[in-house]
Image: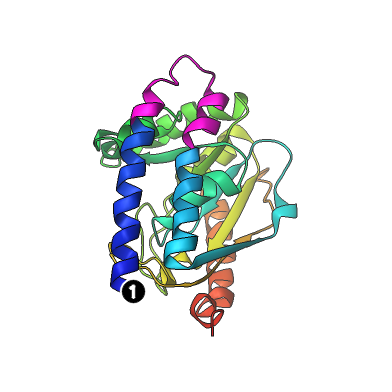
């Protein structure tokens, strides 16, 4: 049944992606916020499918830590689940992503309509400049900025190298940073077809004011909070259903 449920989910997700991608092209005349609300209907649908087909539930703790003003979300990256769910669980935001994702048929079309910050990870200096310039603009437009400092998904229980981009933007834009931990990788592992039933916990940490901090110091503080919280969440996703 695990294989059948996972395969059915993948099939329906693929169909939804095609439908919403085509629909997204017609939202071009709308404001960025209106496009966001329409296109993230795909995110809501996929999260719903994951719940009812694969049994992947979720809970969010720490919502009171979200600032009223647009902020920079720096989140753990274990799975595809958080890239889909965080845009609908948190206030509207622009996602920092690698440019190649926008070239993916259908999926990339929809992503391109959400005002992402698409960077070339092979050119670190140019990427930092782009994150700072476009990140400031997105914040000024009333959008938060979502960045996964590890850059790529890491297996549950492991720690990737935390890139400086999010901390660099925060110190240059004087914007609050919100660290986010979760255990999605325990149920929806990276590059895995099989998706396991259980409860994902998304934990939102206290906002960090970057005033007077260097990017390296801020980055280390964010990493320390996220990885400490990951220890608290480890194993909970699977045991929550037992």
Residue 44, percent from left and from top: 51, 46
* Image position, residue 56 (x, y; %): 48, 66
Name the quadrant of the N terminus: bottom left
Between residue 94 and residue 33, name the one nearer to us: 33
Q: Position of residue 54 (x, y in %)?
A: 42, 66
In terms of depth relative to the viewer, which is nearer, 54 or 148? 54
What secondary structure characterizes most of the magenta part? helix
Point out residue 194 in the picture as x, y percentages from the top left corner.
31, 69
Residue 26, visible in the rendered structure: yes
Taking the image as shown, residue 132 lies to the left or right of residue 153, namely right
Extreme residue toward the bottom, this view: 242
Tell me which corner region of the image, top left, top right, bottom left or bottom right, holds residue 157.
bottom left
Any part of residue 214 in sight = no
Dividing the image into 4 quarters, which one contains the C terminus?
A: bottom right
Stretch in magenta: 22-40
Q: Nearer the viewer, residue 183 or 69?
A: 183
| Residue under pointer 1 | 2
- Residue under the image location 69 percent in, 46 percent down: 209
């Amino acid at each position: 049944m695990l294989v059948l449920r996972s395969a059915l989910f993948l099939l329906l997700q693929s169909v939804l992606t095609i439908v919403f991608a085509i629909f997204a092209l017609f939202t071009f005349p709308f404001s960025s916020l209106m496009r966001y609300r329409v296109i993230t209907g795909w995110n809501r649908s996929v999260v719903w499918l994951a719940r009812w087909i694969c049994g992947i539930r979720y809970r969010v703790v720490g919502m009171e830590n979200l600032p009223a003003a647009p902020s920079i979300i720096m989140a753990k990256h274990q799975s595809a689940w958080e890239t889909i769910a965080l845009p609908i669980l948190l206030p509207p935001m622009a996602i920092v992503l690698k440019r190649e994702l926008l070239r993916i048929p259908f999926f990339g079309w929809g992503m391109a309509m959400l005002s992402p910050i698409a960077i070339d990870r092979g050119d670190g200096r140019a990427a930092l400049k782009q994150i700072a310039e476009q990140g400031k603009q997105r914040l000024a437009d009333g959008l938060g900025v979502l960045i996964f400092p590890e850059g790529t998904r890491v297996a549950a229980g492991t720690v990737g190298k935390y890139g400086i981009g999010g901390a660099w933007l925060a110190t240059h834009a004087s914007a609050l940073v919100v660290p986010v931990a979760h255990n999605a990788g325990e149920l929806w592992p990276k590059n895995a077809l099989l998706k396991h039933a259980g409860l994902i916990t998304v934990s939102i940490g206290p906002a960090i004011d970057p005033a007077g901090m260097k990017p390296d110091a801020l980055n280390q503080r964010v990493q320390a909070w996220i990885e400490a919280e990951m220890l608290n969440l480890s194993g909970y996703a699977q045991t929550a259903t037992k």
